[in-house]
Image (spheres, rainbow, N blue to C red):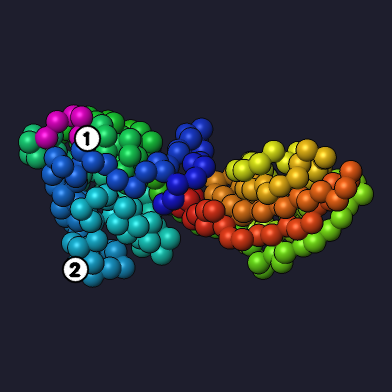
């Protein structure tokens, strides 16, 4: 999981968005996270057929802050072919037997916070499982089947990779007679061949610039542009992002203005492997 644009899935018209937050304070402080982790491990062992040892299952759930480990185990179970929708339904059906609110002595506030922020619980919530699923109230069989199918289909999606920089750009010196054009696609690539969109924001200075629909950055220094300018170049594949810092130094030469150097000092935000999908 990551923290950029949400991943989406539309099985049968259902759209799932994955939380970008990896922890829930109330889930941790209430003890509900640990209780859920134990129940999830029991449900996995009861269904069986997983490509993990019992120790991996028992120790790979609640890490003290989130149930991201549980989601990773389910993901591997589906990706490996060990589990399909049938096994996922049996897993959810076992969890549905529990009344986590009463047994953990917690409140609906903690569960609601977990459903909104925890990676695993947010995926379950957006598969159609609400607070009643965790309170000992048996849900309709067709709703359980739909949730299992949605979750399995989402976990089956290939992993998305963040855009990246194939090589670190070198500093450039230039005195353009016209606006300088940078082809942003030359500075970012995507291993999945996803179409990239680009945005540019100004972190420092007032250098005039424009980003064209084709993904070109036009730098247009004027007489009042002398000085140091900092820009942030961002590439997005619709789910994940990578950001590159660009320093621009403009100096005056008499009545004219010249753009002297372009430098890429370092990324202000490393590429992020976002909600997994």
**Magenta region's main secondary structure?**
helix
Image location of residue 242, percent across then percent down: 58, 53
Magenta residues span 106-111
Q: Image check: 196 left or right of 210?
A: left
Residue drawn where x is 45% and y is 39% of the image: 17
Image location of residue 201, percent across then percent down: 64, 41
Given residues 242 and 179, the one toward you in this image is 179
Q: Image check: 124 left or right of 214?
A: left
Given residues 215 and 237, the one toward you in this image is 215
Query: What residue is shown with label 2?
Result: 55
Query: What residue is shown with label 1?
Result: 111
Q: Disc 2 vs disc 1: which is toward the camera? A: 1
Given residues 190 and 144, the one toward you in this image is 190
- Image quadrant assignment for residue 54: bottom left
Question: Could you tell which of marks 2 and 1 lies nearer the N-terminus?
Answer: 2
Mark linked to residue 195: none
Residue 108 in magenta stretch: yes
Label 2, label 1: how far apart the Cα atoms are: 27 Å
Q: Is residue 113 visible?
A: yes
Image location of residue 23, percent across then percent down: 29, 45
Per the image, label 2 sits on a secondary structure element best described as: helix
Q: Is residue 168 above or below residue 219?
A: below
Per the image, label 1 sits on a secondary structure element best described as: helix
- Image quadrant assignment for residue 70: bottom left
- Image quadrant assignment for residue 16: top left
Residue drawn where x is 23% and y is 41% of the image: 25
Q: Is residue 237 visible?
A: no
Tell me if mark 1 has few (under 14), some (14-19) or many (20+) residues whose alpha carbon lies within 10 angstroms of its own: many
Residue drawn where x is 15% and y is 53% of the image: 38
């Amino acid at each position: 999981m990551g923290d950029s644009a949400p991943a989406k899935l539309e099985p049968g018209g259902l759209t799932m968005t994955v939380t970008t937050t990896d922890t829930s304070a109330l889930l941790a402080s209430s003890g509900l996270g640990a209780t859920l982790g134990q129940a999830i491990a029991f449900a996995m062992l009861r269904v069986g057929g997983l490509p993990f040892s019992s120790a991996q299952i028992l120790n790979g759930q609640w890490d003290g802050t989130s149930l991201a480990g549980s989601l990773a185990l389910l993901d591997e179970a589906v990706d490996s072919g060990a589990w399909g929708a049938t096994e996922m339904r049996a897993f959810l059906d076992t969890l549905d037997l529990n009344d986590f609110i009463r047994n953990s002595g917690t409140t609906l506030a903690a569960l609601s916070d977990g459903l909104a922020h925890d990676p695993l619980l947010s995926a379950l919530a957006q598969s159609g499982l609400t607070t009643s699923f965790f309170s000992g109230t048996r849900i309709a069989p067709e709703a359980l089947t739909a949730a299992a199918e949605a979750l399995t289909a989402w976990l089956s999606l290939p992993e998305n990779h963040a855009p990246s920089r194939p090589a670190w750009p070198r500093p450039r010196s230039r005195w353009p007679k016209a606006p300088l054009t940078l082809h942003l696609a030359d500075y970012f690539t995507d291993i999945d061949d996803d179409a990239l969109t680009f945005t540019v924001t100004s972190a420092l200075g007032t250098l005039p610039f424009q980003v064209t629909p084709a993904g070109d950055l036009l730098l247009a220094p004027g007489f009042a542009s002398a000085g140091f300018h900092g820009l942030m170049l961002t590439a997005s594949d619709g789910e994940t992002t990578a950001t590159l810092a660009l320093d621009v130094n403009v100096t005056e030469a008499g009545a004219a203005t010249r753009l002297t150097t372009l430098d890429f000092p370092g990324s202000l935000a490393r590429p992020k492997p976002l909600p997994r999908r």
